[in-house]
Amino acid sequence: MLKERAPGESRVAITPETVKKFTALGATIAVEEGAGHAASIPDEAYREAGAEVATGPKAVEGADIVLGVQAPDVAALAGAKPGAWVAATFDPFRNGELVEAYAKAGFEALSMEFMPRITRAQSMDVLSSQSNLAGYKAVLTAANEYGRAFPMMMTAAGTVQAAKVFVMGVGVAGLQAIATAKRLGAQVSATDVRSATKEQIQSLGAKPVFVEEVAGIEGEGSGGYAAEMSEEYQKAQAELVSSHIAKQDIVITTALIPGRPAPRLISDAQIASMKPGSVIFDLAVAQGGNVEGSSPDETVVKHGVKIIGFSNTATHLAADASALFARNLFNFLSAFWDNEAGKPILDDEIGNAVRLTQGGKVVSERLT
């Protein structure tokens, strides 16, 4: 495993816990010196777990499999075996040149974002594990920026009203955002384009806010993701949100559509309708943003409303995010481990889903 080189990336793809597990399977693990420091993992912890701590490129010298959080540049893989696997996040829809470079170099790129959302792959799903933490962090960050308390407080000096939190998009991140805001004592509501999420919202004690009487709209795309909505739905949703959002103190937006820019959920006019001092956290800001005017890693103030969002939210919880990410990778590879071959052999369903390149070509159907 190499040290992550993407700006601001603090997570790691292997932890001492998974070093021990891989070693038990018969694998030899090498970790670049200093790779875990940003995630509070010293080199000595890796050594004690049984890994070799190597300097720079030596960490991938002779490697059959390279693990990463964000896929390294091809140049960093010099010394890895021809045809070596690289299991990491590739952001393949936006990083086509990187995928082509992997194909040209003969490496087999395994994109963890393309893990199919099927029951047996749930423990391998890095998007879910990282989104869970991102939803939690979004609420805590918004609470910190919000200049008031979250729960209702009855004091001798008077009553402090509970904050009103509105979560837009009820996937893994949205559900965790709802649960976190409820635990902090807020009055929570939520919406999603998928009608099936209404019961999930209610099960967490939040109020569902849904477009009604728009026939034939379920919002469910392939793999459990949201689909892009019709103009009729978008208009109805905008009207509903406009009336609801004006009453909110904090809004968390989480909507993403695979392979497309993040859908615009909140316009400048809707921001202007909110009370001064309100906060919006845009979890989709790195993919273009759900909120008009949001900017990665910046606090933008418009009409007295703070708009915030991180380009990489999970990295702000590096230790826990690394632990979950590393377990996802171990669960993925160990599920296909062949003791006789001494390495994993992927089956067709999951292998074909995550494999971007093989034999010098881009082979993913989603990219070709």
Image: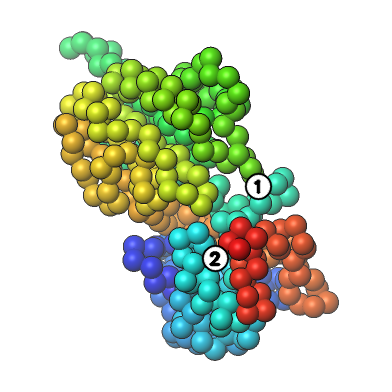
Which residue is located at x 67 percent, y 79 percent? Answer: 359
Could you say whether the residue bearing mark 1 is in a helix, strand or loop?
A: loop
Q: On screen, 99 above or below 288?
A: below
Q: Is residue 310 left or right of residue 299?
A: right
- Distance between mark 1 and mark 2 Cα atoms: 17 Å
Which residue is located at x 43 percent, y 31 percent? Answer: 168
Q: Position of residue 341 (x, y in %)?
A: 80, 78
Q: Is residue 210 left or right of residue 149?
A: right
The reply to whether discs 1 and 2 touch (Cβ–Cβ < 8 Å) is no
Residue position for label 1 = 117
As drawn, which residue projects farthest toward the front?
231
Could you say whether the residue bearing mark 2 is in a helix, strand or loop?
A: strand
Q: On screen, 121 above or below 224?
A: below
Q: What colour scheme does the image use?
A: rainbow
Q: Position of residue 286 (x, y in %)?
A: 37, 52
Which residue is located at x 16 percent, y 31 percent? Answer: 304
Residue position for label 2 = 88
